[in-house]
RNA sequence: GCGGAAGUGGUGGAACGGCAGACACGCCGGCCUUAGGAGCCGGUGCCCGAAAGGGCGUGAGGGUUCGAGUCCCUCCUUCCGCACCA
């Protein structure tokens, strides 16, 4: 062999930064990603990924969501689907206001500037977004329809106003978001003033009307954990509403109804006290003069705690007696009324009957304050008077009621029914269902959002803005001031309006809508983003919806994804859309955390800038690396240490494609077929590997298993690498394999595969056509079929031998063969074979004694 | 605290209840290079052993099974959500 033969052939290096922009531009020119929504010649596929908030820059987390979704889009197109894959921006939101407050830039300018930059960054991914359908929620042509929906909801009784507590900064006169309340002392993020709770009239959407239907997931294929989380979030409980009556005392006339919800009406005789939420409307009336000071102090303190703190069972129970009693409707007993922060105003009726014997929280409370504990449910074998060292909450089939008057000795479930029935006949109770989920508070006391289209008139009260007057536009300029409250309140042009009913001067609503309203219908708007006739093009809705595949973070499991389902059902009831569920299939990818394992955020300084990585490795390497990292639903801390391996992989594909005849100077075996292989066997082995890889990769596309997909493509490439420079390099089998390899890479490494594809076409003298308009290949079942396996043989569960077995042998033949193997005989020596477990094609386990 | 998810080599991870560690990173060795932060080949869970081979190993403890990383129970740790961040 001459030295020249060992020299590496000079081929172009893989230069992603040169290749990628060129193809991105070409695809744009060809309109490759524009979807003709009226084309019904192919089956439709609506692919949706959660639209981003225009925070300023894409971070690697955006790539983690988008690039595999983009691969789905490309794969579906190769399989003959008409894919619609739109994108937009969730453009209202707090960060734009924070920027306005901190640097004086107007929210809209800040947002639009960010969108401009993020569009540019999205292009560098090589994503197949159809930009012609882009939606930007802060534009009047979008939020106009939020307002229209609001009016429809109002008309249908799905929107209403009610008092609700908010976090309030008494110095700045603003309502604070949760993230604007800092530290354990709960102070304002801007001025450090301790935050107080304040009750405001607020707008709500009546999502609880749909609670039962939201518990059903008919016809949709969603991950089990998300369904469980939504189910628990809705938290449907069956039980009874029971009417207690306030007892007469020196300071209170008595006779008022005090309603409680309980899931355990069977334990009614065990109620030894009552607990109201500190916010309960009757607290004031029931407080005795002697208790007043203590009660007031407790109420103030309770309002400083968050709900999570209040519900924590770790925290010692606190509470104060009101100095009043209530009367238990089943036995006429007087029991004291307390307030305690573990009872929430928003759940049930905001009041409970406390049964310390059979509820852990009530038990802890009774212990702490020396309140009586009376057992009313006893499992068989216990006496009614046994001292309890904890609440008995279990349910067993042979427990009975005790200390329960005429209901004693009844089985508990029967007792529950009987007690409820008796109360019902006396008008003092009824079976009831309550949900943990609360109506959706959609009002925000902030200027940067969709104005709620109502007007307050001294004469006519709350007057909806007439449809013809929509949109109610935001002013172009907000006057933010350090202590100024909501700028809309200071904007006479916005604020002052004539009442649509009586024409007299009136005041506009200054509350705006929660951004979750925007994100509860944006995918319909993609179908006709500039439609000024209707929010949603009903015809296109019927063709394209529901969304076939939705991708996005699991952190949206209960809020966005539940609101979206609610809005879909409500719009269906209003006749706006034809479907009842918005998203047929859902996939929740994991989150990319910072290198420190914490959530990526600018303030932590742990954000990974993808532009920098693209410049260094190219988008295709980043795409593959993110897919190769691990299962898509898992996410993980950002750790770029494996990125070189993926880049190397692409370079190896580059080498085997463009220089199959080259040899490796560093490997003495280079250019020789592996030991014992003739060219024919080698060609077959390569083809078998190619087709098996294709089978696996196809399967992995269906399950979004990107990491093993890339691994399998690496294996195939490694095999080609070992055959480079041999007799088979560049032959028919080789060419077929390269062709399959590039097609398999097309959805995941779109620029790279396009480049090599075009070079091969040019080399073959063929006319150029994009690899992305090719069909996904089919594997040859004959090549994929297995004709021999290495059968693992265990003795008592321990691996002892691997036996080559041709397919087609009978079980008896295989067992006979296995028992003759020297290693097996050695392990059976002096022992008795008790049993042979033979799982055909998997293993043989010989059980001995 | 409540709800959801996850714990496997030095690292990311692979494994229809059936060969634990595929594929990579890193590291070690070799080759090739004027040079390498380029490229190629080989090795690499831990312990004993020169090797052949053997033993031990999937957060901890128990259970089911011929067989458990995988299923069940108890516990520990980490991450996500908890209603005005999106």
Image (cartoon, grey):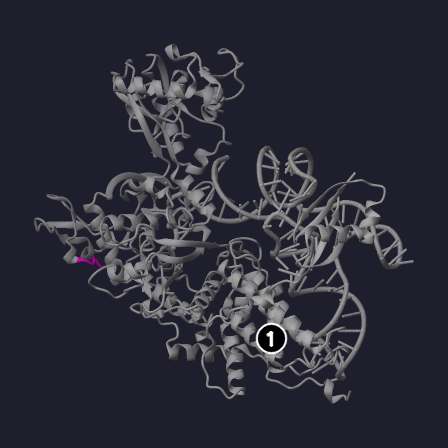
Image quarter of the N terminus of chain A = bottom right
In this view, the residue in front, A616 or A420, is A420
Q: Position of residue A709 (x, y in %)?
A: 56, 63
Determine which residue is flagged by label 1.
A653
Q: Residue at x 51, y 11 (%)?
A: A383
Q: Position of residue A613 (x, y in %)?
A: 54, 69
**Position of residue A597 in the picture relative to residue A40 (left or right):** right
In this view, the residue in front, B38 or A256, is B38
Badge 1 density bin: few <14, some 14–19, many ≥20, Cα 10 Å:
many
* Span highlighted in magenta in the image: A470-474
Q: Position of residue A2 (x, y in %)?
A: 77, 89
The answer to whether A422 is drawn above or below residue A153 in the figure is above
Residue A136 visible? The answer is: yes
Residue A372 visible? The answer is: no
> Subunit of mark 1?
A
Magenta highlight on residue A602: no
């Amino acid at each position: 062999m001459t030295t020249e033969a060992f020299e590496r052939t000079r081929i172009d290096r893989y230069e992603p930064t040169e290749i990628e922009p060129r193809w991105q531009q070409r695809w744009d020119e060809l309109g490759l990603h524009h979807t003709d929504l009226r084309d019904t010649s192919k089956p439709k596929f609506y692919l949706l990924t959660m639209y981003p908030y225009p925070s300023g820059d894409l971070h690697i987390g955006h790539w983690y969501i988008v690039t595999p979704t983009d691969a789905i889009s490309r794969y579906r197109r190769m399989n003959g689907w008409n894919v619609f894959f739109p994108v937009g921006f969730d453009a209202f939101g707090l960060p734009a206001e924070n920027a306005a407050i901190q640097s004086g830039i107007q929210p809209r300018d800040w947002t639009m500037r960010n969108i401009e930059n993020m569009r540019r960054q999205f292009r560098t991914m090589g994503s197949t977004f159809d930009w012609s359908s882009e939606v930007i929620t802060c534009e009047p042509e979008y939020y106009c329809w939020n307002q229209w929906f609001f009016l429809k909801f109002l008309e249908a009784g799905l929107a209403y106003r009610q008092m609700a507590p908010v976090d309030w900064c008494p110095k700045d006169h603003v309502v604070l978001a949760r993230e604007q309340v800092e530290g354990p002392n709960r102070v304002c993020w801007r001025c450090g003033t301790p935050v107080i709770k304040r009750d405001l009239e607020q707008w709500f959407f009546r999502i609880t009307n749909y609670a039962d239907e939201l518990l059903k997931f008919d016809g949709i294929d969603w991950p089990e954990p998300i369904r469980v989380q939504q189910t628990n979030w809705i938290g449907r409980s069956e039980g009874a509403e029971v009417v207690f009556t306030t007892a007469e005392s020196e300071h209170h006339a008595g006779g008022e109804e005090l309603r409680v919800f309980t899931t355990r009406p069977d334990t009614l005789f065990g109620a030894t006290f009552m607990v109201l939420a500190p916010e309960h409307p009757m607290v004031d009336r029931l407080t005795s003069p002697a208790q007043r000071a203590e009660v007031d102090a407790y109420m103030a303190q309770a309002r400083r705690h968050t709900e999570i703190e209040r519900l924590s069972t770790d925290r010692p129970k606190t509470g104060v007696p009101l100095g009043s009693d209530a009367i238990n409707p089943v036995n006429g007993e007087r029991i004291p009324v307390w307030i305690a922060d573990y009872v929430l105003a928003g759940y049930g009726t905001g009041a409970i009957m406390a049964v310390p014997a059979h509820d852990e929280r009530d038990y802890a409370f009774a212990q702490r304050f020396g309140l009586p504990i009376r057992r009313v449910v006893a499992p068989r074998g216990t006496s009614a008077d046994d001292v309890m060292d904890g609440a008995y909450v279990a349910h067993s089939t042979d427990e009975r009621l005790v200390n329960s008057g005429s209901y004693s000795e009844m089985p508990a479930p029967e007792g529950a029914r009987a007690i409820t029935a008796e109360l019902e006949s006396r008008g003092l109770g009824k079976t009831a269902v309550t949900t943990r989920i609360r109506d959706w508070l959609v009002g925000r006391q902030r200027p940067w959002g969709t104005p709620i289209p109502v007007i307050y008139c001294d004469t006519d009260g709350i007057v909806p803005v007439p449809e013809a007057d929509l949109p109610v536009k935001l002013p172009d300029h907000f006057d933010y001031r350090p202590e100024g409250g909501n700028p809309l309140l200071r904007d006479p042009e916005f604020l002052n309006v004539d009442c649509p009913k009586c024409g007299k001067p009136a005041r506009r609503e200054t509350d705006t809508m929660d951004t979750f309203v925007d994100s509860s219908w944006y995918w319909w708007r993609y179908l006709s983003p500039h439609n000024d006739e209707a929010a949603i093009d009903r015809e296109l809705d019927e063709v394209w919806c529901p969304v076939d595949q939705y991708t996005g973070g699991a952190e949206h499991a209960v809020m966005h994804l539940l609101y979206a389902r609610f809005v879909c059902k409500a719009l269906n009831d209003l006749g706006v859309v034809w479907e009842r569920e918005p998203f047929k299939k859902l996939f929740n990818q994991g989150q990319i955390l910072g290198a420190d394992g914490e959530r990526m955020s600018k303030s932590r300084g742990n954000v990974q800038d993808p532009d920098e990585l693209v410049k260094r490795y190219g988008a295709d390497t980043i795409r593959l690396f993110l897919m190769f990292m691990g299962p898509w639903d898992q996410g993980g801390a950002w750790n770029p240490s494996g990125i070189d391996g993926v880049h190397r992989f692409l370079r190896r594909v580059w080498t085997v494609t463009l220089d199959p005849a080259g040899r490796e100077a560093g490997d003495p075996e280079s250019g020789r077929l592996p030991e014992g292989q003739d060219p024919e066997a080698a060609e077959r082995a390569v083809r078998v590997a190619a087709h098996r890889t294709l089978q696996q990769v196809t399967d992995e596309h269906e399950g979004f298993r990107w990491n093993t997909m890339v691994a399998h493509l690496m294996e195939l490439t490694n095999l080609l690498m070992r055959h480079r420079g041999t007799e088979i390099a560049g032959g028919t089998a080789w060419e077929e394999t390269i062709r399959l390899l590039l097609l398999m890479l097309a959805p995941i490494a779109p620029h790279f595969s396009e480049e090599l594809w075009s070079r091969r076409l040019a080399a073959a003298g063929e006319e150029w056509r994009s690899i992305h308009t090719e069909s996904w290949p089919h594997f040859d079942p004959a090549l994929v079929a297995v004709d021999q396996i290495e059968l693992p043989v265990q003795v008592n569960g321990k691996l002892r031998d691997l036996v080559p077995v041709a397919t087609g042998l009978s079980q008896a033949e295989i067992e006979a063969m296995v028992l003759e193997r020297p290693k097996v005989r050695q392990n059976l020596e002096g022992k008795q074979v008790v049993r042979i477990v033979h799982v055909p094609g998997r293993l043989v386990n010989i059980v001995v004694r």
